Amino acid sequence: MPVALQVGLCVVIGIGTGVLSATFGVGGAVVSTPGIRSLGATPVEGIGSTLPSVLPSAIAGTLRYHHEGFVRWGVVRVVAPWGCAASVAGALATVRFPGEGHVQMIITALLVIYTALTTSRSPKASDLDAESHTPLATWWRSALIGAGAGALSGFLGVGGGILMTPTFRRWLKLPLKDTVATSLACVGIIAIPSSITHVTQGTVNWVYALPLCLGVIPGARLGAKFAIQASDRTLRLIIGWGLGIIGFAYGAAEVLALVS
């Protein structure tokens, strides 16, 4: 494939990634990773090369959400530091894990499907009752979410949002739009140390990474605008169906690649 065409397709993938990243609050690598894999990236490059684009995507989307008052910065202040520390360990583990990246791709698909199922369900009144949470309970839950999301960000290259989106809803009882906005803010911060670690490990191919970075910025602005204007029910169903389809397709492709 000519390099110019490859770069152009990466930019298009980046735009789609930015839209879905800001709409779902998951970092967008669930789209960009299989996208650049289809253009020839190896599984390990698919993990590392998507992370640099997470930061500009998250910044563009978070600024729009912040303007509308949806970002819970108190949660971000607890989640992000734990996530940053854990992301380095996850990134270091990527190149040492057997399966040449295919296993991580399958794990990602399963987590995407889990996020789709949990997010698409209509919440019960008790699920949104935050009054039962003491500040200490909220703090340790946020810290645990951050550590888990950071480890997944570095290990799978997905930004960590596939864990934060369902757990912010179920553990911290955040409304859906606050969940998406706060997850996206955390995703951007956590992606910084994991991206740096992947660069030093040699798993980032900039032929894919740079065009993705260009595309995600306008895409994230569009995605955030749509999510803010959508009703909670519409957003819930779109996240559920969108991530569900991506997860099943993603997992099937990687299983076939692993066994072939």
Image (tube, rainbow, N blue to C red):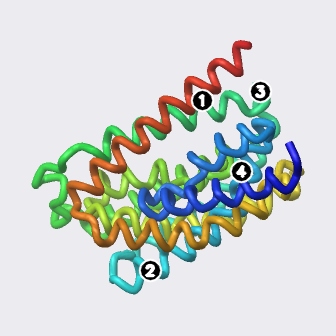
The kind of residue on which mark 3 rests is Pro
For the residue labelled by badge 1, is the local secondary structure a helix, a strand or a loop?
Answer: helix
Label 2 or label 1, whichever comes before in sequence order:
2
Residue closest to the eye, 200 or 41: 41
Q: Earlier in the sequence, mark 4 or mark 3?
A: 4
In the image: residue 199, left or right of residue 249 = right
Quadrant of the snapshot with the C terminus: top right
Mark 1 = which residue?
A: 106
Q: Nearer the viewer, mark 2 or mark 1?
A: 2
- Residue at 40 percent across and 54 percent down: it is 165
Q: Which residue is mark 4?
A: 89
Q: How many marks?
A: 4
The residue that disc 3 covers is 98
Classify 10 Å Cα crowding around label 1: few (below 14), some (14-19), many (20 and above). many
Q: CA distance from mark 3 to mark 2?
A: 40 Å
Q: Secondary structure at mark 2?
A: helix
Q: Quadrant of residue 245?
A: top left
The CA span between labels 2 and 1 is 32 Å
